[in-house]
Amino acid sequence: MATDIPDKQYFKIGEVAQIAGVEPYVLRYWETEFKAIRPEKTRSNQRLYRRRDVETVLQIKKLLYDQGFRIDGAKKRLRELSGEAPSASATALAEKLHEALGELEKIVDEDEQA
């Protein structure tokens, strides 16, 4: 079911909460977990969400509530959907794991030959 987003540039937190069907505290929490949600703040510290923030909120809600992802899984899936490359630390870890796997395979082969 598609959610209609009103045709305007900025949305207050209450409006976004109503559109997404979640409480404002949930949005504030998601802001701390997902870099893709970065509302601007006014001088009075009121959050102003852009349309793409609202779209991202709806995508996060779908991942968490409908598709059963946990926060970390939803972060990863959002990166995949946005075409964002894995972080340097994730790439380095994958390389180290690949090297370790290669070493383990050598050890197993040596044991089987002995």
Image (spheres, rainbow, N blue to C red):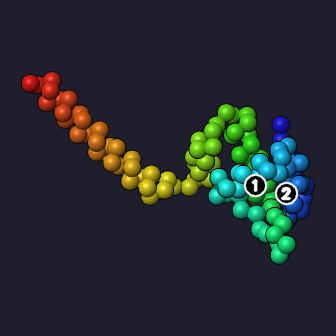
* Dot 1 or dot 2, earlier in sequence: 2
According to the image, label 2 marks what residue?
A: 13
Q: Position of residue 40 (x, y in %)?
A: 77, 68
Residue drawn at the location 48% of the way across and 56% of the way down: 87
According to the image, label 1 marks what residue?
A: 28
CA separation in Å, label 1 and label 2: 9 Å
Q: Is residue 100 left or right of residue 25?
A: left
Is residue 114 depicted above or below 61 in this figure? Answer: above
Residue drawn at the location 75% of the way across and 54% of the way down: 28
Kindly identify the amino acid type of the residue bearing the numbered disc 1: Arg
Q: Are marks 1 and 2 in contact (CB under 8 Å)?
A: yes
Kindly identify the amino acid type of the residue bearing the numbered disc 2: Ile
The circle drawn on residue 65 is none
Q: Secondary structure at mark 2?
A: helix
Q: Nearer the viewer, mark 1 or mark 2?
A: 1
Residue drawn at the location 17% of the way across and 29% of the way down: 109
Q: Quadrant of the N terminus?
A: top right
Comparing 6 with 88, the one in front is 88
Is residue 79 depicted above or below 51 in this figure? Answer: above
Badge 1: residue crowd in 10 Å (few <14, some 14–19, many ≥20): some
